[in-house]
Amino acid sequence: LIEKLQTHFLSHSLQAKMSRPVQARRLEGIDKNIWVEFVKLAATYSKVNLGQGFPDFPAPDFLREALTRTLSGGNHMLHQYTRAFGHPPLVEVLAQFFEKLLGRDLDPMTNVMVTVGAYQALFCCFQALVDEGDEVIIIEPFFDCYEPMVKMAGGTPVFVPLRPNPPKDGKLMSSADWQLDPAELASKFSERTKAIVLNSPNNPLGKVFSHGELGLIAELCVKHDVLCISDEVYEWLVYDGKQHIRIASLQGMWERTVIIGSAGKTFSATGWKVGWVVGPDRLLQHLRTVHQNSVYHCATIAQEAVAQGFQRELMLYGKPESYFVQLPKELQQKRDWLVQSLDGVGMKPIIPEGTYFLVADISPFKSDVPDDPNSNEPYDSRFAKWMVKNKGLAAIPLSAFYSEAHKNNYTNFIRFCFAKEEATLKAASDILQKWKQEKTSS
Ligand code: PMP
């Protein structure tokens, strides 16, 4: 009898499982994700991983010491829940810091919220601000999660590309050569537009938007009463003396902008997943509703240690010892090193003005990875897979940062992450040089 009952329950539960659709409609069409595939490929085949964007050098001593102090110090309450919208010491120091950067008074309780990385900040923005039928303008190429996040909120992404202009006099291209066409950008704004996503410095190109470009975006936002979701996670990683300009500081923009930041990128500790939003209470109050009803808050000890990191940086603001001064200097050297080694083998780099990333033209290496006219996978994606499997070098295809409709317009580029130890960059350069030699001798 027991056996019969077991069989009955088993077949019943199987039937129940199989008879109804389990997937929510909002997930239709967004269930594929290139990171799952490329992270796995890199883990399986890569000897050198310049794919995903994280440093392989240690986070700064002062940050690690802050975490150790937090863990071993006397305050056992740091192991318990803290305030949902941000651990008080962290929102307080963030408010002080951003008061300096934006030149306006901020209330730590209403103008700042701490999130689980910039990722959750983005999620809160789309869930809180985008309705069914709203359009959200996304500048291509873009950090890939913007598109599914807009769709999950019921919105419609509207894409506008940065268009490359050929460099003059045989010079290497710069990320500044990728520009918006003002008329094309203006044509994307309509009554249905709720928001534009701006990412400066931009992942994957490393473009740092100029004052003029930001002015154009700001003018259109004000004219059409559109919000700006400003992803500024690479705000400190800007090179060659360039300035990162915060669009919220342009006229008419504070009221309509949410600034997003990340301790992961700011302090080279991407695994900590501490992020934040800064903006007017009028917008943040709705983000708080999403946050409160989804994750509540991120680890108290991580927030406490990041708060101590910011307190140090506030004291050293603008001084040579500041991490926010030192890190871009170090990364600029790494960028220059990778630019040189790529240029040396003919994989023409687009010199990035900021970020962890560099995009390079794979054209001279294409003969090793023949095209397959029957495949609808973009060529750069097949190239990157071939490269990691056959050469042990992991990178990310640029087409991954384009919408489905435009993926096949940009298939000659791959993205490298140069936030790596010198030895890692040297190993990558050795692989490329050997590959080049094999090509010339065959
Ligand atoms: N925005 C951009 C442009 C990014 O590149 C990343 C991380 N790769 C994020 C947001 C997410 O940041 P976090 O790790 O803090 O969630």
Image (cartoon, grey):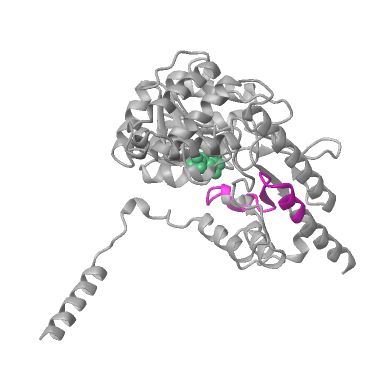
Query: Is residue 170 shown in magenta?
Result: no
The quadrant holding residue 340 is top right
**Residue 104 on image: x %, y %:** 48, 13
**Residue 122 on image: x %, y %:** 44, 38
Name the residue located 37 percent from the left edge and 27 percent from the top edge: 284
The quadrant holding residue 169 is top right
Name the residue located 45 percent from the left edge and 36 percent from the top edge: 70
Name the residue located 13 percent from the left edge and 81 percent from the top edge: 5
Farthest residue, direction right: 441
**Residue 137 on image: x %, y %:** 49, 35
- The C terminus - image quarter: bottom right
Q: Depth check: 58 or 162 in front?
A: 58
Highlighted magenta segment, given as a residue range: 401-427
Q: Depth check: 360 or 216 in front?
A: 360
Q: Is residue 209 visible?
A: no
Query: Is residue 424 shown in magenta?
Result: yes
Q: Is residue 294 visible?
A: yes
User: How many numbered marks appear?
Assistant: 0
Farthest residue, direction left: 1
- The N terminus - image quarter: bottom left
The quadrant holding residue 23 is bottom left
- Apparent side of residue 216 relative to residue 353 in the rendered image (left or right): left
Q: Depth check: 140 or 238 in front?
A: 238
- Apparent side of residue 255 relative to residue 142 in the rendered image (left or right): left
**Residue 206 on image: x %, y %:** 65, 38
331 relative to 51, above or below:
above
226 relative to 138, above or below:
above
421 relative to 201, above or below:
below
